[in-house]
Image (cartoon, rainbow, N blue to C red):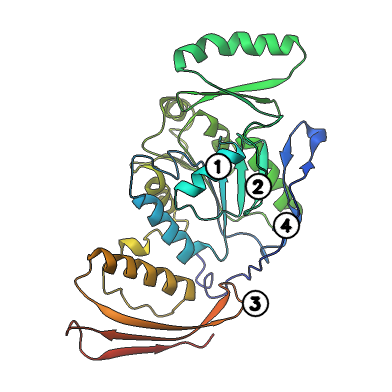
Amino acid sequence: MPSDRRRNPRPSPLVAMPPCVPCDLARSFFFSFSCVSLMDKLDGSAYIMIVSDLDKTMVDHDDPEDLSLLRFDALWEAEFSQDSLLVYSTGRSPTRYKDLREEKPLITPDIAITSVGTVIAYGEDMPDNDQCPHKVSFFVDKEGADKVMGPLKHNLEKRGLDVKIIFSGGEALDVLPKGAGKGEALLYLLNKFNSQGKAPNNILVCGDSGNDTELFNVPSVHGVVVSNAHKELVQWYEENAKDNPKIIHATERCAAGIIQAIGHFKLGPNVPARDLGFPYPKEDAVYPADVVVKFYVLYEKWRRGDLRYCCRTNLLLNMKPGTAEGFELIHIHKTWLEEQSAGSEHMAIIL
């Protein structure tokens, strides 16, 4: 990782986006995507672009406290949010994607790909629908899917419909245009960035089920199959990617597997503030985003009663919209309480 990467964070102005509009219909590739201002978000290429499925990849529904997701959130905000791109790529419809964001502590992504790659939106901008004209979905078990996939594809092709049929998650059967899907959506985005001379320096794709297979087939990406992946993706990995050094089958579940992959491929720091012991080790340089993340993690631990040490910390922030974080950090004053540490510690930063 370049030593000056975090010393010169990119500016990230908030730009109002127009409503989602169809584009590239001529390619039989059906997307809704607001792309003009996204191209201007980075001064140059993203350091890393993480493209992750949501259910059972980024989000662990068996983790009621969302600990692995919160660990990823802390790592992303402190280490990557200023010069990188976060992309969610989910089979959920826009409506069901919004429902998940209400339920789980998901960071707002730079880009959201929904409906198995048939809808793309930027930031908070998302159409409000459950089904869309370019994806039809059914719930069916694996035995039923095995019976119907071949005849269904044959009958649709007889009627002049060029489609792909994807079974994933042990229950979801999706019918898409041949030119759509998660892999095609990612290729579309990469072509947009390439046309602006802003191709990401690194790409990490992350998945757990059959509809994520296409992501791993995009050239030059690093990939992680999380440890809790469904059988159809594990089987694909064993047959197609086991000997590919750029794709790993993680030993960790969900978001913890993504963090593991960041470390495995040496794509950047992979120790979230939530994993650090307290007091935090001193660093040669201080970065506002890192300080704020550590402060909130510390506050959360204090409220849970997990801290052996206790201190009162005052942060003086000055709003400054022109900076990457939206503020400048002026002063930190830590006063240790109940004889946990002698005296008080001062640190002043002018940015």
User: Label 4, label 2: how many angstroms apart (C-alpha)?
Assistant: 11 Å
Residue 200 rendering spot, x and y as whole percentages: 62, 55
Q: Is residue 74 above or below residue 59?
A: below
Give the residue number, with chain letter if any, for mark 1.
97
User: Label 4, label 3: how many angstroms apart (C-alpha)?
Assistant: 19 Å
Left or right of 46, for residue 230: left
Q: Residues within 10 Å of mark 2 (few under 14, many from 20)?
A: many
Kind of residue sitting beneath label 2? Met
Instruction: Please say if the residues under marks 1 and 4 sit with CB atoms less than 8 Å apart.
Output: no
User: Label 1, label 2: how many angstroms apart (C-alpha)?
Assistant: 9 Å
Farthest left residue in view: 339
Instruction: Please say if the residues under marks 1 and 2 sit with CB atoms less than 8 Å apart.
Output: yes
User: Label 1, label 4: how many angstroms apart (C-alpha)?
Assistant: 19 Å
Disc nearer the start of the sequence (3/2) = 2
Number of marks in the image? 4
Kind of residue sitting beneath label 1? Tyr
Give the residue number, with chain letter if any, for mark 3.
322
Please report the residue visible at 36 percent of the width from the left and 60 percent of the height from the top: 271
Instruction: Please say if the residues under marks 3 and 2 sit with CB atoms less than 8 Å apart.
Output: no
Disc nearer the start of the sequence (1/3) = 1
Please report the residue visible at 73 percent of the width from the left and 59 percent of the height from the top: 37
Kind of residue sitting beneath label 4? Met
Instruction: Please say if the residues under marks 4 and 3 sit with CB atoms less than 8 Å apart.
Output: no
Q: Nearer the viewer, mark 4 or mark 3?
A: 4
Q: Nearer the viewer, mark 3 or mark 2?
A: 2
Residue 218 rendering spot, x and y as whole percentages: 60, 38
Asked whether 10 or 307 is in front, the reply is 307
Kind of residue sitting beneath label 3? Gly
Give the residue number, with chain letter if any, for mark 2.
126
Mark linked to residue 17 = 4
Disc nearer the start of the sequence (4/2) = 4
Residue 215 rendering spot, x and y as whole percentages: 57, 37
